Amino acid sequence: MDMEWMAWTTPTAVFFLCIALMLAGMTVWEVVSPTVEAKGFLPMRTTRGDRLFIGLLGSAFIHLGWLAATDLSLWGAFAVSLVWIALVIRFG
Amino acid sequence: MDKVQDNRAWFLIIPVFLIVAFSAVVPLMTVVNYSVQEIFGPGQTFFVGTEWFEAVLKDDRLHDALVRQIIYSLAVLLIEIPLGILIALGMPGGRSAKTSLTLVLLALPLLIPFNVVGTIWQIFGRGDIGLLGATFRAIGIDYNYTNNSAHAWITVLVMDVWHWTSLVALLCYAGLQSIPPAFYQAAKIDGASKWAVFRYIQLPKMRGVLIIAVLLRFMDSFMIYTEPFVLTGGGPGNSTTFLSQYLTQMAVGQFDIGKAAAFSIVYFLIVLLFSFIFYTIITRTGEGEKK
C-alpha cells in the first residue's frame, strides 16, 4: 500500500510508536494491577489514565511554551516534560 | 451460577475501532506528519523540524485571532447558557399541543444549515433591504456591520445566540422533565421559594445536560467558521476573523500546508485543554453537591 500521501518521517514515526507503546503499556499495567481513583496534588480525584492524559497534555504545552519563549534546544523541554509526567503519574 | 469468562464481545467493537481509525486517528497522524514538513506538492516534501510551530507561535495575527476567539466563546457561553436555562424553565411541561408547538419552534433554528444562517443574517442586517438594518436606520442608529467592527461583532454574536440557544434550552428542558414530581411536592411541603427549588433541585438535576451543553457550545463556538465567513468574511479588517477562518486562509488560500498543519495541532491542543478544564470544573461542582 502506498503510504506516501501521509508523508511519514522517522521522527513522527518514533513519536507515534512511543504513544502506541505507552497505551499498550498502560493496558498491560491495568490488567496486571487495576487502577483506583486517588487524590494527589491535582485538584480532583484521578485514575492512572487521567494522570497520563494530563501529563501528556501538559507536556505538549511545555514544548509549545518552550518553542515560543526560548531559542534553546527542544531537548530541554523534553527533559522538563519527563519530570512533569513522572510527577503527575506518581503524585498527581 | 458461575460467570463464564467470554471475551468474544471485544470483536464487536472492531468495526467502530476501524471507522474511528480511518476517520479520526489516521487524518490526525497525517496532520502531525505534515506539520514538520515543507510541502510543495505530492511527493515533494522536506523535513523542517519544528520550524512551522515556531512560526505559528510567534505569529501576531494568530495571537489576535486566538484572543478574539476566546472572548467570542466566553460571550457565547455567558449568554446562551443562562438564556437556555431561562427558556427551559419557562416552557410548558407535560404532553399538550402547546408543548409540542414550543418544541418544534425551538428546534427550527437548529435545522437550518450554517451557511443559510449566515445568509439570512447578512440580508436581515442590511440597511437597504433587511428588516433589522432598516429598523435601526428608522430609529436613527447608524448600524452597518460591514464597516463597523462593534456592529459586526454584535451581529455575529446575536446570530450565534439565535442559532444555538435552542439547543441549550432543549437539553435543559430534557433535564427538567426527568425530575420526579415527588421532589417538587417535598419542596412545596417545606415551603421552599422558587429560587430554592431552582438552586437545590432543578440546577443539580440539570448538571448532566449542562455539562453536555457547555462542552458542545464551547467546542462549536471555538471552531466557528461558516456563519461569520458568510456574514462578514472576517471583516471589517480582521475584526471577526476567528481561528478557523485564519487557518483556512493559511491552508487553502496560501496553500501553506505545513504551517496550517502546525496551526491545526496547536488549535486542537487548545480546544482539548479548554474542554478538559470545563469538564473537570463542572464534574467537580457535582461532586461537591453529592457530599
Image (cartoon, grey):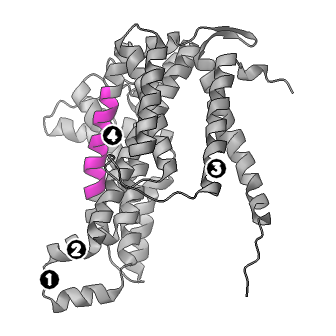
- Observer-side mark, 3 or 2, equals 3
Dot 1 or dot 2: first in sequence order is 1
Q: Which amino acid, mark 1?
A: Ala
Dot 2 or dot 4: first in sequence order is 4
Q: What residue is rendered at 20% in x and 70% in y?
A: B199
Magenta stretch encompasses residue B176: no
- Please identify the residue farthest to the right as the structure is shown: A1
Q: Residues within 10 Å of mark 1 (few under 14, many from 20)?
A: some
Q: Which amino acid, mark 2?
A: Tyr
Q: What residue is rendered at 35% in x and 74% in y?
A: B176
B184 over B207 or under it: above or below: below
From the image, tell me which residue sits under label 3. A27
Q: What residue is rendered at 73% in x and 57% in y?
A: B13
Q: Helix or strand or loop: what does disc 1 sit on?
A: loop
Q: Position of residue A2 (x, y in %)?
A: 84, 23
Identify the magenta region.
Answer: B67-82
Q: Between marks 2 and 4, how big is the CA–CA gap?
A: 28 Å
From the image, tell me which residue sits under label 1. B192
Q: The numbered mark 4 sits on a residue in which chain?
A: B
From the image, tell me which residue sits under label 2. B200
Q: Helix or strand or loop: what does disc 3 sit on?
A: helix
Q: Between marks 1 and 2, how big is the CA–CA gap?
A: 10 Å
Q: Between marks 3 and 4, how big is the CA–CA gap?
A: 36 Å
From the image, tell me which residue sits under label 4. B73
Magenta stretch encompasses residue B73: yes
